[in-house]
Structure formats: C-alpha cells, structure tokens
Image (tube, grey):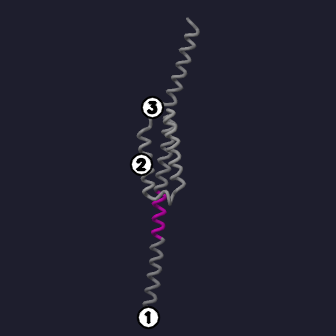
Amino acid sequence: MNVPKIATALTAMVILTQVAACSSGPPPRQELSLTQSSIRSAEAAGAITHASKPFRLAQQKVTTAQSLIEKKKFDKARMLLESATADAELAEATAEAEKSRLASEELTESIALMKEEIARAQDN
C-alpha cells in the first residue's frame, strides 16, 4: 500500500469527523424561533423594566448562539438557546410577579386611604 495515500485518507476522515462533531444535526432553527418568541413574551410582560438582568442575559445568549450557528457549531448553539429560553421565561415570570407586587402595594395604599376617609366621616 501507498503510505501517503493512507495518510491522506486518514487525515480526510479525521477532518470529516471533526466537522461532523461540530455541526451534529441540523441548524437549531426551531430552538432559535422558540427563544426569540420567549424573549418577545418577556419584553411584552415588562421584563426590560422589571427583570432586566435575566432579560439582557437571554438576549446576549441569543447573539452568541447566532454566531455559533454561523460557525456551524450547532450543538453548542442549541444548548445556549435552551439556556436563553430559560432566562427569558425567568425574566417574564419575574416581571409578572413584580407587576403583581406593585399592584398589590397600590391596592393596600388605596385601602388605607379609604379606611382613613371612613374614619373621618364617622368622626363628623
């Protein structure tokens, strides 16, 4: 056998294996779409104001994942997108909870004012 041909074939196999390992599977288009949808939902819930840290983190992870997709590192991108989706969902839940807390505070203040008015009316 010709040693240079075997070495060339082995080198080609190693390169193909490495390329396949980097991109294993199709591009994570569905995951990207799901993550972007989660980010839009978080934004609509007020995450920019009430949960900016996890919201920004989700956005940063999407940007990094998009770069990884361009480099054909689909598995890494997919994992990062899953993490970004979790961050966006956390941001949405945090924003909703904060809005509920603020509404509760407003109601408590309103009730206190009403009680004061009732007490004044009863004193007159």
- Are the residues flagged by discs 1 and 3 in contact, CB closer than 8 Å? no
Sequence-first tag of 1 and 3 = 3
Circle nearer the viewer, 1 or 2: 2
| Amino acid type, mark 2 | Ser
Cα gap from disc 1 to disc 2, whole angstroms: 58 Å
Q: Tell me if residue 38 is in the magenta stretch.
A: no
Query: Callout 1: helix, strand or loop?
Result: loop
Q: Which residue is mark 2?
A: 37
| Amino acid type, mark 1 | Asn
Q: Which mark is residue 124?
A: 1
Cα gap from disc 3 to disc 2, whole angstroms: 22 Å
Query: Callout 3: helix, strand or loop?
Result: loop
Say if 117 sits above or below 47 in the image. below
Residue nearest the viewer, comparing 123 with 8: 8
Residue nearest the viewer, comparing 64 with 108: 64
Sequence-first tag of 3 and 2 = 3
Which segment is the magenta one? Answer: 93-104
Q: Which mark is residue 5?
A: none
Q: Hey, which quadrant is residue 30 in on the image?
A: top left
| Amino acid type, mark 3 | Gly
Mark 1 surroundings within 10 Å by alpha-carbon count, few (fewer than 14), some (14 through 19), many (20 or more): few
Sequence-first tag of 1 and 2 = 2
Q: Which mark is residue 25?
A: 3
Residue nearest the viewer, comparing 1 with 59: 59
